[in-house]
Each structure stands twice: as C-alpha cells, then as structure tokens.
Amino acid sequence: MLGNAIVTVLVPEQLDGENGGHLYGRFTNSKAHPIDERESYVIVVTSASSNKKPPIGCINNDSRIQTRRSTRNVWVELSTQPQIQLHSVRVSGDNVCLSEVNLVTYNCKEICESELISRKFLYREGDDHANNIVPYFVNSVQKDCKKTNSCWLVKTVLALLLVLTKTILYVTWMPKVLLEGLHYVLVNKFDYSSNLLKQTLLRIKQFETLEHELRENKRTLVAGRLLAMIAIDTLLGVSVVFLVSSHASLNDIYSIFCSSTKLLASSVQHLLEWLRGAPAGLKLNQPLTQALSAFFSYHVHLWRLYLDLADPVLRSLASVFFWLGMGGASVQVAILSDLMDLATLHLYCFYVYAARMHMLQISLLGSQWRAFRGRKWNPLKQRVDSYEIEGGHMSLIRVLTAVIFTLVIFLLPTTTVYYLVFVSLRIGLNTVRGILSLTMWALNINPLYLILLNLMDSNRMKGDIYFATQPIDNARARYPIASPLALHLHTWPTPLCEVLLYAHSDVFPAMPSPNWKAFFCSVVFGKELL
C-alpha cells in the first residue's frame, strides 16, 4: 500500500475534462488487518465509456446532484472538471474518509502499450494484490485495453502478415526438409558447414517464430524486431540485385568471378616460382624446393582445368544464386562466402599438404631425439618410457637416429617456409570469411527497430514506474474536512541495452567470435585450420 491509506483509487488522466458517465474497471481487497480488522482495497478505473459490465462508479461534475448508489461492494464518485478530483468512496455500503484514500492518476496509453512493465511486474493469481498494487494495476489496465482495443487497421495488417508468413512456411516446408538433410550430410560426413544453407534454415526459423507471435495476436518487441529485420534485409537484397543488374548482365558477373579466380591461381603460380629460388634471401634445399614447387604447380594446373571443366555447372549455379539473392542481403553475403570457399578450394589443399609435411618432420625429429636418448613414446599409456636393447645394437641405433635427425633438421627450413606461406594465405582467407560472417550476423540481429523506438521515446520502451505527489490546491475547497493523498504514476524508459537483451530470441544468432586458443594451436601444431 501507499502510505497508511486503506483505499487506493487509480484513475486514468484521459478522463480529465469528461462531461459525465459511468466508471468501469476492477477492484480487489486484502484480508482484514489483525489489529484494526480493516480491509485494504485497490480500485482500478480503466475507462468511462458505455459498457455492459456493471460500473464501479460515476463522474459527477455537480456536487449538488445525488447519484444512484451501486449494489456492488465499491462505488467511486469523481469530478473531472476542471480537473480529476474525488468526491466520495463507498466500500461495502459505508463511506470511507477521504484522508484514508490515495488518488493516483496515470497515463492509460503508456501502461497499455508497454510490454516491459508487465514483464517486470509479473501478475500472479492468489497474491495479496491490495498490498502489492502495481502488478494488479498493470494487469487490470492491459487486460481491459485488449478487450476494448478494436482498431480494424491494426487487425487487418496483422491478419495479412499472418497469411503471408503461413504461405511462406507452407511453400518452404519441403525445401526445409531437404536442406536440413543436406546440411547434416555436409557437417557430419564432410566436416563442412555451408553459410548459404545455415542462413536459409535460419530465415525459415525466423518466419516460424514470427508466425507464432502473429498467431497468438502478439505485438511484442521480438515480433516487431523480427519483422523489421526481415523487411530491411530483403529490401537491401532486392536493391543490390537491381543495382548490379542495371550495370552488368549475369554473364558479365560470372566472367568477373572466373577472371578473379584465374587471377588468384596465376598469383599462386608466381608465388611458387618465387619460392623455387631463394625467397627473401633464404638458402633453401634446392632439390626439395624444386620438387615441392613442381608438386604445387601441378595442382595449380589442375585448379585451372577444374575451372574450365566446371564452367557449365558454375554458370548454372550463378543464375540460381543471382535470384536467391532476392531473399535478402544476408543471403547474398552467405552466397559470396560459399563462392569464396569454392574458388579457394585448392589453396586449402595446399595448406593441408604443407601442414602434413611440416608436422611429419616435427614428429620425426621428436621421435629420433627420444630414440637417441634411449626413450620411446608409449601410445597406450600416453607417456614417454625408457627402454634398453641388449648387445651392440644400441650403438647402431644411435648412429642411425643421429643420421636421420640430421637429414630432417636440414630439410625442415624448406618445408617450414612453404608451411608459413600457405598458412598465411589460409589465415587471410579465414579473416575475409570472418568479416563476411560478422556482416551476416549484423544483418540478422538488426536492432534498428528498437533504436528507432528508443529515439522516439515510444511507450513500448517504458519499463519502470514510480509515484510522485502532485499539488491539489483547488481540491481544498472540495474537501473541507479531509482530502486524499494525490499522486501521479510516472513511467520511466528502459535502457536500450536492457531492451536488446529482453527482445532477444534463439532466432537471433550469437556473435561469431574466433577461438584464439584453437587458432594458435592449429598454427603451431599444424592442425587443419578451417
């Protein structure tokens, strides 16, 4: 309760200036106090319009007129001209002294449109609402607003959006099943995750969440954020498609892609020729560097041949990808990421070859060093054990291990140079891929809708309330003996960071962040850096 009053009357400030009429709303009471055996009452006035429900009070701007008393437990009599003031409160047939009443005015629109207030002040059945006013008050006002709010335009728009989302989900039902199966095979059999497949499945999931919100007739912040995000993403995608198509044809775009890929292959060929000699003045093992350069050059030749043979297929895929880009800018970024993986497939193979050769020599150095010291690796116990060989074989083994160790350590710098070159290329490609992933993430979490609501100081961003006293100078003439405590209920906007955390769902992906520990371990130990 507020103060020591036994009755709290909450009246919407929108009633200020009303000529007359009955008051409608809800009321509740608490159990009798064990000392003075008095009950506490909370009366929430929500409207003053014509309604079939029995009224809980009336508006009487002329104190000389005697109004009809209701047979209900409570009856509130207000005057709204020149301002909202309380005439009398009747509870269980008895008049309540106005000094024991709190008169609280509030903005009905702010409470009705706020989703965060009802979330913070959660209403539970069975609570003592007369001593915990705010949850009961918020629930009463918002429940009455849902019943009386019958804007045909809003309902029509929501119905059209619901039909549109259901149509999209019906059309994409079978493709979703096929794409989920393909994604499962790629991830579990080939250890590869296609960004286009993930983005397509995520977009379908976003439509499913939006359809659920619309079906429940909810205009939540999550639904608004989803709808704005999909609309902006699609608009950007369509704009990019029309902008590109107005300056170049599909064949021109494909030709640019092919020429860029072949230029990349030529650059790798020049890099191999540079490594064939003395790169940066380094003295490399000439037979080994010649063999490695010839090996990788042959794969560059296969890379170019692969592009020529796959030309018809890639041209068909280009036309499909071009029209898939109409699905949104995030889909276009996902297509670009997959095309980059497709174009740089051989560079990944080069990296794997160089990493395997490099780590094979490193492991060989370790095993020969242990063998020279009379130790060996026990794979069963995962530890290094000592061993002894009887006879004169130990000296021969140490000579052989020393020879092999020397050969490997002189060949190691050459393979290390090739490994460092190709791992640098792989890191550069992964950096570009990470930038594309961040772009997709930004397009999929797009908080522009919430930012605009915050800038416009929308009622939907209000998330807290507080009570403040207000002067009642003119009320003293109306209340010669006692007057109620006049309060005003104010709402306070929620910080944007808290709204972003609240208006979040599993359809908004988490920010992609690199695993630096795994990254450095992959570079140092030559693991596959995907």
Image (cartoon, rainbow, N blue to C red):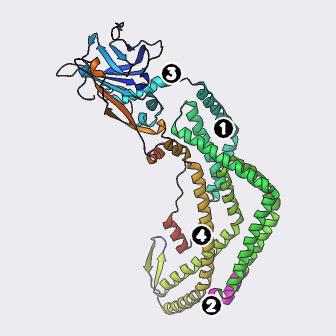
Mark 1: amino acid: Leu
Mark 4: amino acid: Ile
Say if mark 2 contacts mark 4, CB within 8 Å: no
Sequence-wise first label, 3 or 2: 3
Q: Give the number of the disc on residue 169.
A: 1
- x 53%, y 40%: residue: 222
Q: Mark 4 points at which residue?
A: 427
- Between the C-alphas of marks 3 and 2, the distance is 86 Å
- Between the C-alphas of marks 1 and 4, the distance is 39 Å
Identify the secondary structure beneath mark 3. helix
Sequence-wise first label, 2 or 1: 1
Sequence-wise first label, 3 or 4: 3
- Between the C-alphas of marks 2 and 4, the distance is 25 Å
- x 57%, y 53%: residue: 442
Q: Give the number of the disc on residue 283.
A: 2
Residue 214 percent location from the top left of the image: 58, 33
